[in-house]
Amino acid sequence: MSASTARRSTAGLALGLLILFVDGYDIFVLGTVGPSLLVYQPWGATPATLGLLGSVTALGMPIGAITAGWAGDIWGRRAPMTISLGWVSIWMLLSAVAPTLGLFAATRLGTGIGIGALVPLVVAFVTDWAPQARRSLFVGIALTGVAFGGLAAALVGRAVLPGLHFQLLFLAGSVPLLLVPLVWRVMPRTVPRADTEAAADQAIAASTSGNNDTPNKAAQLFAPGFRRATVLFWAATFLGLVLVYGASTWLPTLMVKAGYDLSSSLEFAITFNLGAIVGTVVVTLIADRGFLKPITVVCFLLAAVAMFTLSTPQPRWLLLAMSALAGLGALGTQNLINSYVARYHPPQIRGTALGFSLGVGRLGAIVGPSYLAVVTVLITFPDAGFYAFIVPAVIGAATIAAIPSRAKARAEAPSKEAAV
């Protein structure tokens, strides 16, 4: 790899990490302020309200993910990325000044559209420019930006809550508006040509669409060589995001219900994100050695183990360690899934594949907070919320295990020449 290529890859990674830091802060800040929001008398929020706010935020994400992923493949990553970053910053500012619960919920819907757009654009962009042998690592490091952002939200919350009004934490989410000119200047406008690793897969897509440069990107996801994997990736992303958004919205509140005070419960949120950061780097190094699929299955199962352990009486150090393991099992697993989708598809449909995977999968982000709200309201057993995480984790592991290898997918597809 030449020095210029290495610099380009490193610059792309740094920019992606910064943008996803913004994304992570905006995602996790709602969970951080959850306990404070529930005791804010003028709004009269309940646990069901917190679940609804998490689901409203997630409701906008499929719109952003599908639209931005498709637009990034058609017009390049730069314009959609710039628009999305500015969009999410403006809505976070509006969340900070919303005078009523209803208007606050509306601002979370707008924020969700921007949040949904950023991940597929960044993952596609980083994968486009990463060294071929280190793509999972580069994508994994970029995606730790989400956990770093969540960590920042938890640290800020622990430092200022409940002393300051919780809405002030949303004000920090408007600062990334200053990054818009930088993103416009640094990001390349065009999508690179297909690499050798993906050339055979590009031929599969072309055999169905006739021309892989046309806007009909979505149809290429259902070419014979991609069809089964597409459906399974959607299902795995759904289950992964049930874990991520359920935990990001509910973990501090569940720890309060388990008997910890607000300060201590936020410590669990901090270790959750630290576990995701460190764990993602470790597992992506393993993934780049040819074990992307098995390590993703293992990480789903680790989430189940961690949540079960958190529901039992254990020494504090072990519970904190399990919180970190839960971060790897939730956020780390979803990072691996995103990398898997990006590596499975060629550059010309990479953004579309990620956009639809995250867009359809975002239904899990919508379901996750409300799913936990229903469980905690209907089942009075204190640890029911932790048990609720185990089911999607186990099913997610089985879903990833069922994804066909790329070699098998190619064998199932007609050749380009035969199709012509």
Image (cartoon, grey):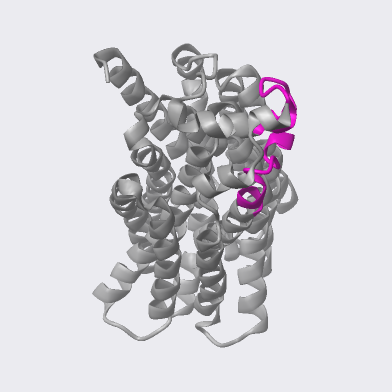
> In this orientation, does residue 165 appear?
no
Question: How many numbered dots are placed on residues in this image?
Answer: 0
- Is 159 contained in the magenta span? no
Q: Provide the residue span drawn in magenta.
A: 205-231
| Quarter of image, res 399 | bottom right
Percent x, y of residue 287:
35, 49
The furthest residue to the front: 418
On screen, residue 327 versus residue 360, left or right, reads left
In this rendered view, identify the residue nearer to me: 76 or 315.
76
x and y, in percent, of residue 264 in the image: 35, 68
State the residue at coordinates (58%, 61%).
239
Q: Is residue 352 left or right of residue 136?
A: right
Residue at (47, 22) in percent of width and height = 179
214 or 317, which lies in front? 214
Viewer-nearest residue: 256 or 306: 306
Task: From the viewer's perspective, tell me whether residue 18 is left or right of residue 390.
Answer: left
Judge whether residue 213 can be spotted in this image: yes
Vertical position of residue 53 compared to residue 384: above or below: above
Where is the C terminus found, in terms of image quarters? top right
Quadrant, the N terminus? top left
Magenta stretch: includes residue 223: yes
Give residue 303's quadrant in the image: bottom left
Please name whichever residue, 229 or 146, is drawn nearer the observer in this view of the structure.
229
Residue 264 vertical placement versus 91 (above, below): below
Give the image location of residue 99, x and y in percent: 68, 45
Expressed as whole percent of the image width and height from the top left, the position of residue 50 reads 63, 62
Left of 172 or right of it: where is 84? right
Report the residue at 62% width, 43% height from top.
Answer: 225
